[in-house]
Image (cartoon, rainbow, N blue to C red):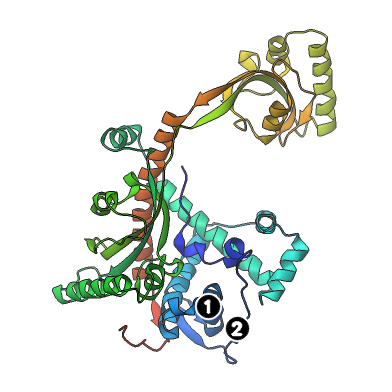
Amino acid sequence: MKIAFSPVLASLLVLASALPVATVRAQETTPVDAIVAVVDEDVILRSDLDRAVNTILAQYASQPEQLPPREVLERQVLDRLVLNRLQLSRAQETGIRVGDAELDQAVQSVASRNRMTMDQLRERLATDGMGYDEFRTTLREEMVIERLRQRYIQARVQVSEAEIDQLLTVRQVGGPEVRLANIVVAVPDGATAEQIAIAQKKISGVRDVIIKGELTFSAAAIRYSDAQNALEGGDIGWRAFDAIPPAFAGTLQSMKPGDISEPVRGPNGFQMVQLVETRNSGQQTITEYNAQGLMVRVSPTLPAEAARQKVEALHARLVAGEKFADVARASSDDTLTRADGGDMGWFAINAWGNAIGNQLQSLADGQLSQPFQSEVGWHIVERLGTRQQDVTEQNRRNQAREIIAQRKSEEEFERYLRQMRSEAYFDSRLAAPAADS
C-alpha cells in the first residue's frame, strides 16, 4: 500500500527536494536564545523558530509578496514545529528509531538525487548556512516521523477487495487525474454559529482577493489557510477523480486549469480548491519474463566462498546437460521454487530482486546465466521467454486500493494529530499577531 508523504514532513527537509533550484541563505538569528513555546516537557527555542522561518523565507526569496507578515508566518511555522515535536515524542515512546547506517544511506540518497558527491553536499550545506550534523538530525527526524505515520495508519487502515470492487463499480478509476491545491479555514469542534459565520466570511473574502488578482492561490494559501499544507501553497498533488471528496468531484468536472471552486463546508471547516492542471492515463503494458532459477544461500554454516564453489559445480552440471528442474529440486535453497524445479513463472523484471532482474535483461531467451551473487546468496537463472502484458486492469485495482487507502489514511492521521495536539500541554510565548485584513 502506497502511503502519501505527510505535508508536515515535506517541508522539514528543503534541501532534499529543492536543493537544485533554491539556495537557503543564512539569516541573522536572535542573539539571546529565548523560549518561544513549551510543549509538554519540551521547549521550542527562538533559534529553532528562526531557523525554520528563514528556510521558508529562502524558498520564497524571489516572491516575498506571497508570504504573510512575519508574525503570522511565525505562528504558522510554530504550529508545525509543535506537531513535529509531539510526533517525535510519540515515536520515541513507541520505540521507533532510525539507525546510523540507515541514516547514512538516506544522506547518500539525497546527494545522489541532487547529483552531488558527499563532499559537494557538505560544501553546499556550508554555503547555505546549515551544518552537516544539523542536516543529519533534520533528516533523521523526518524519517522517524514518517515511520510513525506509516505505523499508525497501517495498523488502522485496511482496504478490502469488496471495497475495491464497489469503487470500480460506481466510479471510473484509471481515467483523468487532476492536480489540486486547497485553502482551509478551520472551525473549532463545537463551534458556535458566530464562529462558523466568521470562518465563512473569511474564506469568501480570501476567494474574492484571489479572483481580483490581488494574490495568487498559492500566496493566499500560505497567508490564510489553516491546513497542514499551507506553507506548500496548498498543493495536495495529483488525484484521480475518485480520490476527491464528493463535495468537489462534481464541480471539478466542469472546471478548467486555474479555476477556483466555491467554498464548501466540511468536517473541519470551510474549504475551496483550485484545479492546477489535468492529465490522462491510458493503457499500460509491461514486459514480463519467464525464467527458472536456483539459489545457494549464504549462511553461517556456508560462507560466501563455499556457496560460490557449490553454485559453480551446479552450473557445470547444467552446462553438461543435466535438466535444470532436476538440479533445482535436488540442490536449490529457494523454498519458493524448489518444489517446482526452479520454475519462477511469469513476472515483472524486478519482482525477484534487482540482481536477478539485471541478469535476465542481459540474457537471450533460452540462455543460461553465469553464477551471480545477490544479498542472500548465489544464483543461476535461465531465461525462457518474454511477453508484453496488459496491466491496465491490475493497475486500476491497485489505483483503487491506493485511492481508498489514501482517503482513509488522511482522515485517520489528521484525527490522530488533532487528538495529539488537544491532549498536549502547549504554552506559546509569541505575541498574538494582528488580525488579518
In the image, taking residue 228 as reference, residue 148 lies left or right, namely right
Residue 277 shows in the view: yes
Q: Residues within 10 Å of mark 2 (few under 14, many from 20)?
A: some
User: Reading the chain from its start, which is encountered first: label 2 or label 1?
Assistant: 2
Going by the numbered disc 2, the residue's amino acid type is Gln
Q: Are marks 2 and 1 in contact (CB under 8 Å)?
A: yes
The residue at the point 50 percent across, 63 percent down is: 9
Helix, strand or loop for disc 2 = loop
Q: Amino acid at mark 1?
A: Leu
Residue 156 is situated, as x and y percent measured from the top left of the image, at: 38, 48
Kindly identify which numbered label has been placed on residue 57: 1
Q: Residue at x 37, y 54 (%)?
A: 410
User: Percent x, y for residue 292?
Assistant: 66, 18
Which numbered disc covers residue 27?
A: 2
Q: Is 333 situated above or below 253?
A: above
Q: Nearer the viewer, residue 83 or 274?
A: 274
